[in-house]
Image: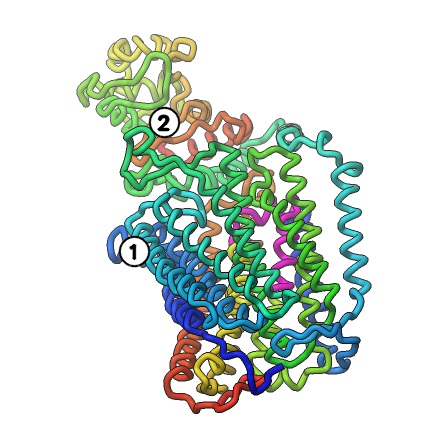
Amino acid sequence: MNWLNDNINVLTLIGAAVIIILTVGIAGKYIKQMKTDKATGELTGDNWDGIGEFSNPLPTGWSLAFLGTIVWGLWYFFLGYPVATFSQIGQYNQEVSDYTKRFESKWANPDHETLMGMGEGVFLVQCSPCHGITGDGMDGKARDLTTWGGENHIVNTVLKGSKGQGYPLGQMPAGLMDKASAQAVAAYIVQDLSKSGKSKHPELIAKGKKLFATCGGCHGMDGKGMGGSAPALVNYGKAQFVVAVLNHGKKGNIGVMPKFNDGRLTDIQKTAVGTYVDSLGEE
Amino acid sequence: MQSSNAINYDYTVAKYFTVSAIVLGIVGMSVGVIIAFQLAFPELNNFFGEYGTFGRLRPIHTDGVAFGFTVSGIMATWYYIGQRVLKVSMAESKFLMFIGKLQFWLYIIVVAVAVVSLLMGETSSKEYAEFEWPVDIGIVIVWVLWGVSIFGLIGIRREKVLYISVWYYIATFLGVAMLYVFNNMEVPTYFVSGMGDWFHSVSMYAGSNDAMVQWWYGHNAVAFVFTVPIIAMIYYFLPKESGQPIFSYKLSLLSFWGLMFVYLWAGGHHLLYSTVPDWVQTMASIFSIILILPSWGSAINILLTMKGEWGQLKDNPLIKFYVLASTFYMLSTLEGPIQAIKSVNALAHFTDWIPGHVHDGTLGWVGFMIIGGIFHMAPRMFKREIFSKKLVEAQFWLQTTGIVMYFTSMWIAGITQGMMWRATDQYGNLAYSFIDTVEVLHPYWTLRAVGGSFYLIGVFMWAYNIYKTATSSKAIEKEPQYASPMA
């Protein structure tokens, strides 16, 4: 556990301990005096409904502490940490940028195992709330990532359309092809275009390549997405495709998947998530 | 000193407010227990449609205990203590008696309207200031009537020097008046633009300014409802019940003015790491730390007043309530400033540690003083012994157990939660999702709800004891000077 390396955690624990120790210690001291000491002093002479008052001096410790905090407060505000010298946004930016730099240099050249471990960690925190901890989409709440990367998934997308990634060429309508044609296109994309896996219907590849003309109108005949105008299908079934979804966000059944390109994930983390998601799906 | 020609104090209004403190205490805290169980078991939201959901019930709990139970307790004790330390009876002024009764019945009407409007979901969406403008106007009228009562009674007093408690009641009146009016400046949308219902309003301030005014109010509602008037109570009930003179006049004076000066600047600590200017946040943190001393000054003064009185602490359950209340006051007023340190707040903010902090103050300090204060008043108001000392003892220990369960579970839950939100895995990614924290915290939330239930049962025991005291306990012939008689 690295939780004691975090100075906020340490300060909080010290703070909590101080609260208990000072309260129990000082209240305990006074309560003990109820047993051991006696009330003494000169009465002021006033009396309200039978209540009198002693004219005892202030407890020394209390007075010194009060004076001390006042002096400390003035010092802090005007000399120690004058207000104009601190910016909370500046501090935030500085800390985030330092952390990101350390992170990026430490994991500059991750191997496959690192990407898988890191990706699983990020997935469980950032993705699993909607996609489920196994990535099965929790009964249709979000995309079932265990089928992603395979041919059925492409067929499904062609039949139902795809929305909400916000590419310049707009949204992909449902029903651009019938099921048989979609299967052929899927075979072509998986085995020939992106080479992310082996098709279960290699005999359909040639037909699919011809039918891909329909897709090429937006995705480009080379499947590269026409310079960012539409998703690059050459990446289908690979980590980069997931990275593209992370950068664009997506409309889903229970809401909109946010864009993750706002600094909350670094490029390395995105690639790691892509690698991990890729491992969940079909070949 | 009591003499044969002692003034015949008239406790009519004090009795009224005692009843409303008990009833609203039961209502407010029952709702509190329900919503605590809802947080642990969300299925419990599903009864009574929209009216039984956490969102509807939460303001009824907070406003119910703050402006119902606590304000009733403040009024009940004022209409009791005020007469006695000013040496003047309400019966001596028909006008003040009329004002007192009018204040009570208007208060009851306003409370009823407020509860119904909150149940209907009509709110201005500001925490602890949820009421729409017609309710706000009612509240202001009730408050002004209280002011007339305070200054009227002071005006006809026989006791030349004002006792410490009276300073604190005056401060409560002025503080709440100022805070409430300025935070509830709102625009009635229907009359300005024709939009919305006639009773609907929006805040006059916007954005960060609204937040700053809101937490200047929110924090100082804690100051002037949960702190200042409760100090007024302890400065009367503890020396009166024990017969001990106050330890130091000087300490009470310095603590009073220290509290008045410092408290009002600390509200910004609710907005650390938000959009309010950095210097406002820094100032709020600094003033929060300085605030420890004037707060502790009062508590220390009270504890030192009991020097040498171990026997009373052991034998008199009311003294136990007061001494433990001042200890919880110390705990809470050290805890708050430490949570207001920016580096600690970075972890503590939005965690369960915050409601933990609120409740060790409200249950241990505010609740115990109102309960213990009314126990002291009851034999004098009803001319009967407290019905059962054993029941008072049992209530004290049950409620103390409840408070300890409440705040320890919330401390552990809150700090765990904050650490989990910050934790990273071996790669440097955030390690936990929201649901991970829910799973870990669930047992603590259950424990909190059980602790709250203990406290609520104690409130029922208190209500029963006071009811029996008022109706069927043994009559007393002569009012005791100090310790309350109990069977």
Q: Position of residue A258 (x, y in %)?
A: 41, 30
Disc ID at residue A250: 2
Q: Is residue B434 above or below residue B57?
A: above
Label 2's element? strand
**Residue B231 appears at what percent x and percent y?**
60, 64
| Picture coordinates of residue B79, whole percent (x, y) | 49, 68
Can residue B244 be seen here? The reply is yes
Q: Which of pointers 1 and 2 indicates the residue nearer the eye?
A: 1
State the residue in front, A112 or B474.
B474
Q: Is residue A106 above or below residue B369?
A: above
Front residue of B112/A241: it is B112
Q: Residue at x 70, y 32 (%)?
A: A86
Q: Give the residue pinned by disc 1.
A: B52
Q: Residue at x 61, y 54 (%)?
A: B336
Q: Is residue B164 above or below residue B135?
A: below
Residue B470, located in which quarter of the rendered image? bottom left
For the magenta stretch, what is the residue range?
B329-353
Q: Nearer the viewer, residue B101 or B413?
A: B101
Structural distance between the alpha carbons of marks 1 and 2: 35 Å
**Image-quadrant location for residue A166:** top left
The amino acid pointed to by label 2 is Lys
Q: Nearer the viewer, residue B59 or A115?
A: B59
